[in-house]
């Protein structure tokens, strides 16, 4: 029975990460039609992401306390239900401001699911499964646009796309409710009886702040490369839009494929050795992106960067129980996920400010500096262990 429970929980964890990639990815396809229906300007989408990030940050920061109070299983169950209800609300929303307001609660649900599954994975899953877990996010991010495109292609409203994704999340949520008792962090005791410390005490650890910084920088590099490389190629280097779009797809594809491929061998490589190799690869990849007069080299640079970035996030999650006392792990994982969310929201914005004041060619040097800082932080954190 233990093997059956473990397998079921693992499959639900995979499905949970697929569900994290679904909601936001459908918005990109639905946005032109939502703009038309609500009469919105192009930049109205920024408010949605700002409010959603606030909800995501709030729930992930508090995830350690929620794990202590309710347990991972209940967090996943009710957060999945909250996310599904928000999608239903979006489908029925009479105005854009309603959808923006719902994005806060949707962000809270997503942040709790992300932190909850990562906390469980850090303690109970091998590095292989942690890598594959995060690869599933890419599967969801790729599936969401396909669902919305199919709905619109059939002549239906974008609202039916939200209903379709909501239906998927309701099935997943039913699975979480049915397995609530299975999501225990240890074999011998429930989360409620496991010793925990307060968030404030965890934040007195300099290593906790360094770990948060690592996730902030990593996700900043990942998001900035994906968001700004296209503009760099098209506007600064005169690469055709179609070719540049293909190369950006290559970057995201390499990142997703890298988690599956490297996940297959992750159990055979020491985590720190894998981190060092991959962080070195990111420095090399972003360095090659600096060669502006060799446009074709950018495709290889983006693929190398994406593939090298792939196992860094899951490897850092897998290392958390080794770097911190068990009483701090739930708090630290939540803080790391919150740092990641801030990195995604803040760093691309700062990169855009730098590019606006200098040029788009500032992107590669900025990425190189961040990758070097990421490497140095990782090494220093390992020494502190």
Image: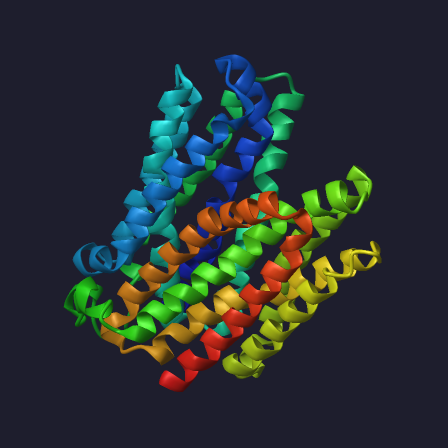
Picture coordinates of residue 251, whole percent (x, y): 68, 54
Picture coordinates of residue 156, whole percent (x, y): 59, 17
> Is residue 112 placed above or below 121 in the rendered structure?
above
Instruction: Give the residue at x 59% y 22%.
Output: 32
Mark yes or no: residue 137 visible. Answer: yes
Q: Which quadrant of the figure has residue 311?
A: bottom right
Instruction: Give the residue at x 36% y 84%.
Output: 384
Instruction: Give the residue at x 36% y 79%.
Output: 323
Q: On the picture, is 320 further left or further right than 21?
A: left
Q: How many marks?
A: 0
Residue pushed farthest front?
A: 357
Mark yes or no: residue 178 visible. Answer: no
Picture coordinates of residue 277, whole percent (x, y): 61, 78
In this view, the residue in front, 235 or 145, is 235
Q: On the picture, is 239 further left or further right than 127?
A: right
Instruction: Give the residue at x 58% y 72%.
Output: 279
> Is residue 280 placed above or below 241 in the rendered structure?
below
> Is residue 7 placed above or below 123 in the rendered structure?
above
Image quadrant containing the N terminus = bottom left
Image quadrant containing the C terminus = bottom left
In this view, the residue in front, 203 or 134, is 203
Picture coordinates of residue 30, whole percent (x, y): 56, 26
In this view, the residue in front, 196 or 251, is 251
Q: Which quadrant of the figure has residue 288?
A: bottom right
Q: How is the image coloured?
A: rainbow
């Amino acid at each position: 029975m233990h093997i059956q429970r473990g397998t079921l929980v693992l499959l639900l964890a995979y499905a949970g990460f697929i569900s994290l990639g679904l909601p936001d990815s459908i918005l990109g396809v639905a946005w032109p039609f939502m703009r038309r229906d609500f009469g919105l300007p192009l930049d109205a989408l920024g408010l949605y992401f700002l409010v959603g990030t606030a909800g995501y940050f709030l729930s992930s920061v508090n995830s350690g306390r929620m794990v202590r109070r309710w347990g991972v299983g209940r967090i996943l169950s009710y957060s999945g239900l909250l996310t599904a209800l928000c999608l239903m609300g979006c489908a029925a929303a009479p105005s854009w401001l309603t959808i923006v307001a719902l994005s806060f609660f949707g962000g809270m649900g997503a942040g709790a699911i992300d932190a909850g599954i990562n906390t469980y994975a850090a303690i109970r899953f091998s590095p292989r499964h942690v890598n594959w877990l995060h690869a599933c996010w890419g599967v969801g991010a790729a599936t969401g646009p396909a669902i919305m495109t199919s709905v619109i292609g059939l002549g239906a409203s974008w609202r039916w796309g939200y209903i379709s994704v909501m239906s998927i999340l309701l099935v997943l949520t039913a699975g979480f409710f049915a397995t609530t008792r299975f999501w225990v962090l240890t074999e011998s005791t429930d989360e409620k009886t496991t010793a925990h410390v307060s968030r404030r005490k965890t934040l007195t650890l300099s290593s906790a702040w360094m770990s948060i910084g690592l996730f902030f920088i990593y996700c900043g590099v990942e998001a900035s490369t994906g968001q700004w490389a296209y503009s760099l190629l098209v506007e600064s280097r005169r690469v055709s839009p179609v070719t540049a779009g293909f190369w950006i797809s290559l970057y995201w594809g390499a990142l997703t494929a890298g988690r599956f491929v490297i996940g297959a061998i992750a159990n055979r490589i020491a985590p720190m050795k894998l981190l060092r190799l991959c962080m070195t690869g990111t420095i090399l990849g972003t360095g090659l992106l600096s060669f502006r007069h060799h446009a074709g080299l950018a495709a290889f640079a983006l693929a190398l960067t994406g593939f090298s970035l792939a196992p860094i996030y899951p490897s850092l999650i897998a290392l958390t129980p080794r770097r911190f006392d068990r009483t701090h792990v739930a708090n630290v994982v939540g803080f790391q996920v919150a740092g990641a969310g801030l990195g995604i929201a803040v760093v691309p914005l700062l990169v855009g400010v730098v590019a606006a004041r200098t040029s788009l060619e500032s992107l590669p040097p900025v990425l190189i500096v961040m990758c070097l800082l990421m490497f140095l932080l990782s090494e220093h954190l390992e020494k502190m262990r």
